[in-house]
Image: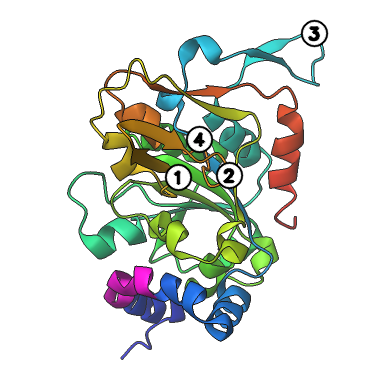
Amino acid sequence: MKKPSMELISTFIVKHIFFLRFKVAQLTKKSKICKKIIKKLLFDKDETYFIPNNNSITKEEIININKEIPQNQEEIILPSNILKEVIKKADDIVIMNTCLCRTSTNCKDYPQDLGCIFLGKATHKISRDFCKEATKKEAIEHVDKCTKAGLTHIIGRNKLDSIWMNARPKEELLTICNCCPCCCLWNVLPNLDEDISNKFFKLPGVEISYDPEKCINCKKCLDNCFTKAITYTNNQITINNKTCRGCGRCATTCPTEAIKISYNDKSINNIIERIDNLVKK
């Protein structure tokens, strides 16, 4: 009888305790000891960025960015282009067969077969029972499929992924998650202590604007916010820019375009380089 792999065991465990994720996250606020243990065990030296879905960006706000190479050429930069540029720099790429979050909850609203992308040397340690090796072209096409499906991208170093897939060291693994509003693990962000949730960043250059004149008080944005940064008081929406991560869910669900996401970052190459440097070559 074939011995079960570490990934098979950890995946089985994760799927069966996934429903406890909010309670576990809440422990980081209730107990200093729990926070210290969870932070060190699962989030040590993490750095993760939300990449809003292209469809959430107001079209007139998309600008031309001068790329460094070649200097005289202009290219329209959308948020997902950041993912693609990082993928182009990668030598080792795998695409997961399914999304662990959506399969754990048996998601009915978004495709379960649009899994995470992982980059870096540590991908060689991930069992091919759970993923397939991919070319840069295949990975970029996967990003486009996820964008079209309405998923929000998250990219960065995430120690938790290196643990459950037994793909260590964490410094050699870069994660690209493709998240739905209903099942994503990172819906727990509001439940995590700030010392941990602050390891997740808004993409530099992303700005959120709100027009109360267009708002019809449908409250759809409240239900879809990753970080619960939107509140409703005195018949008006308020967005907390400190806790907002610029995921863009509010803009894509707003029926009247009362909330808009703009993306204007002239230092695009800097953020691409920073994310790329999160994983050791």
Q: Amino acid at mark 1?
A: Ala
CA gap between label 3 and label 4 equals 25 Å
The residue at which mark 1 appears reads as 229
The residue at which mark 4 appears reads as 140
Rendered residue at 61%/38% (across/down): 203
CA gap between label 2 and label 1 equals 8 Å
Between 67 and 61, the residue placed more toward the observer is 61
Q: Nearer the viewer, mark 4 or mark 1?
A: 1
The image quadrant where one finds the N terminus is: bottom left
Q: Amino acid at mark 2?
A: Lys
Q: Amino acid at mark 4?
A: Ile
Q: Which residues are magenta?
A: 15-23
Judge the density around disc 3: few (<14), some (14-19), many (≥20) Cα neighbours within 10 Å. Answer: few
Is 115 placed above or below 249 here? below
The residue at which mark 3 appears reads as 72
Image quadrant in which you'd find residue 21: bottom left
Residue 148 visible in image: no
Check contact, mark 4 vs mark 1: CB within 8 A. Answer: no
Check contact, mark 4 vs mark 2: CB within 8 A. Answer: no
